[in-house]
Amino acid sequence: MAPQLDGYFAEVDKLSNHFIDRLAKAVAIPSISSDASRRPDVVRMGEFLAAELKNLGASVEMRPLGKQPDKPDLDLPPVVLARYGSDKNKRTILVYGHYDVQPAEKSDGWSTEPFTLTVGEDGRMFGRGSTDDKGPVLGWLNAIEAHQKAGVDFPVNLLMCFEGMEEYGSEGLDELIEKEGKGYFADADAVCISDNYWLGTEKPCLTYGLRGCNYYSVEISGPGADLHSGVFGGTAQEPMTDLVRVLGSLVDTNGKIQVPGIYEQVAPVTSDEEGLYDGIAFTMETLHESLGSKTTVFEDKKSTLMARWRYPSLSVHGVEGAFSAPGAKTVIPAKVIGKFSIRTVPDMDIDKTNEAVYSYVKQVFAKLNSKNSLKVYAQHTGKWWVASPNHWNFRAAGKATERVWGVKPDFTREGGSIPVTLTFEQATGKNVLLLPMGSSTDGAHSINEKLDKRNYIEGIKLLGAYLHYVAEEPQN
Ligand SMILES: C[C@H](N)C(=O)N[C@@H](Cc1c[nH]cn1)C(=O)O
Ligand SMILES: [Zn+2]
Ligand SMILES: [Zn+2]
């Protein structure tokens, strides 16, 4: 089956240094979507992708998305829409990825410069965005190029949608997808997203579910300006003291969410589901390796996978406005903004969850009898998604995985979120598959994010092979 693949694979190997150079160029652009001052870099990254795609012969459109809702003077970065091939006799696959990244500073604890791709002797390629999601996005471009250079016919038509705001809740993209479901994306027969990770470091997986993410700010203010704690300590009510109490009330040490009205919304475990977890290639040792410690909530695999895939979690991320530098500063911050998020799961409802959070936070604050002021609001929200893996799209990806990695993939759900996944499914009416490239130790969102050279190069082969098997699969 798919006999042309050997030529394609050999070409990918031949071009591997060129593909690593392309990733280095992408990592060098600090396209941090959450930092308004970096917006020109995010746009530059979109332009880089568009130029590379045009060089490969794709037709490309840069779609503006208007202003950022919470920053009315700031343009959202454009969505890069591209088409490669329009043969009516071929299937059309729509792929999505994101070209923005999470923030990174060397001073956060990185061992290398975060925006310089640093390839170690052992094949680990460090750099912000290497695995999330520049490596996988470039994987599609590299697959096109390797087909061209190997003289292998590209097996499908490819529609591409690459956005620059995923790490900030995919602002503005839902509307575009909804509009283009029957427009630019009308020909799509299925959707493939490469923007998540294997459960471990050795066994590939196909992913059919994601958690959603509601991201909250809780703002407490009092004094008109930051104060000297010697002069005003003991005489002014302190916003930070209140905030610590509010944040501390949200979740317990074992991750149990304390907000009433959350667990009541969670779908019950079915008997089919009960048996699902034992067969997954995942061990607590793998988890300890990717965690970098043994400080897990659970001691067993099943509870751990269930906690990651099918139960909600609440994480406290940080405090804006608080003193956080090394050393000692005797200040009373005047206004502090705590940030936390809830990962949501079936059957949780975004609005119901928001209401539960607002009401609980207000109640906890009221009990403090503080004279300070409180605001609580959602910065962005995103839906959970669970699909059926019984579809030719998954079958093709399964065959491609066996061909490239020599092993049948696990079928997994993902603890992270890709807010537009459900929107793609609903707007196109087509099956959506998540086909990851990176592994569990890649450290996405963390310091020292990396993508292993092996995962990048074999991942490029995988994406190309998937397209070949898609072309061969009979309809469901
Ligand atoms: C799984 C994907 N690579 C990812 O990292 N998604 C982000 C998206 C996000 C950011 N805010 C809300 N959702 C994530 O899961 O944090
Ligand atoms: Zn991502
Ligand atoms: Zn991410």
Image (tube, grey):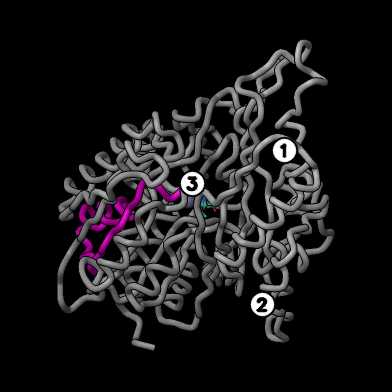
Badge 2 element: loop
User: What residue did someone put label 3 on?
Assistant: 131
Residue 388 numbered tag:
none
Mark in front: 3 vs 2: 2
Span highlighted in magenta in the image: 139-167
Residue 267 numbered tag:
2
**Marks 1 and 2, how far apart in space?**
32 Å
Badge 1 element: helix
**Mark 3 near ligand 1 (CB under 8 Å)?**
no
- The picture places residue 297, in percent across and down from the top left corner, at 81, 55
Residue 205 showing in the rendered view: no
**Amino acid type, label 1:** Leu
C-beta proximity under 8 Å, tags 1 and 2: no
Find residue 307 and report its image quarter. bottom right
The image shows residue 474, relative to residue 397, as above or below, that is below
- The picture places residue 391, in percent across and down from the top left corner, at 44, 82
Q: Viewed as shown, does residue 399 lie left or right of 220?
A: left
User: What residue did someone put label 1 on?
Assistant: 243
- The picture places residue 386, in percent across and down from the top left corner, at 53, 73
The image shows residue 147, relative to residue 54, as above or below, that is below
**Viewer-proximal residue among 161 and 154:** 161
**Viewer-proximal residue among 448 and 473:** 448
